[in-house]
Image (cartoon, grey):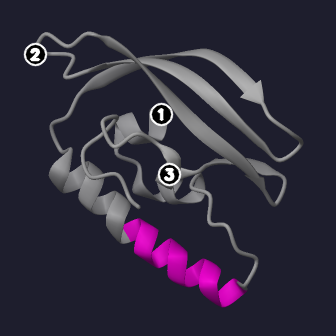
Amino acid sequence: MDALARHDVDQLVEMSYIGTSDPVKIEERKKKLRSEWDFAVNTAGKHYAFVWKVVSYTKQNETSGAVALKVTRNVFNGGYEEKFELPMEQENGKWKVVVSGVSRDLFPALPN
């Protein structure tokens, strides 16, 4: 969420779940994600402001879980607190966000 708030495209790509171990597909997916994240944070969500807090974490098994958040979207225009969840998968020993499983209401133009 910090990388999203700071519009840090490189960190967003790094924290996104890729879902393959094929090196060629990984690089292709990262390139596509970089373009999609860049559009999301620097075009569609350029002036989008929000605040968040982590409410809880649920571990479903050794390689998957979810983080529950309370997010205030449109914080400068009378926003209100809403619940969102970030699905997580472990990839190469690191927890990554499954972006395709995040509600599209969280941030404009999230990658698919």
- 2 falls in the magenta region: no
Where is mark 2, residue-wise? 77
Amino acid type, mark 2: Asn
User: Label 3's element?
Assistant: helix
Which of the two labelled residues, at mark 2 and mark 1, occupies the earlier sequence position? 1
Along the viewing direction, whichever of 89 and 50 lies nearer the viewer: 89
* Residue furthest to the right: 62
The part of the image, by quadrant, that contains residue 56 is: top right
Disc 2 from disc 3: Cα separation: 26 Å
Start-end of magenta stretch: 23-34
Which of the two labelled residues, at mark 2 and mark 3, occupies the earlier sequence position? 2
Vertical position of residue 32 compared to residue 44: above or below = below
Where is mark 3, residue-wise? 99
10 Å neighbourhood of mark 2: few (<14), some, or many (≥20)?
Answer: few
* Residue furthest to the left: 77
Which of the two labelled residues, at mark 3 and mark 1, occupies the earlier sequence position? 1
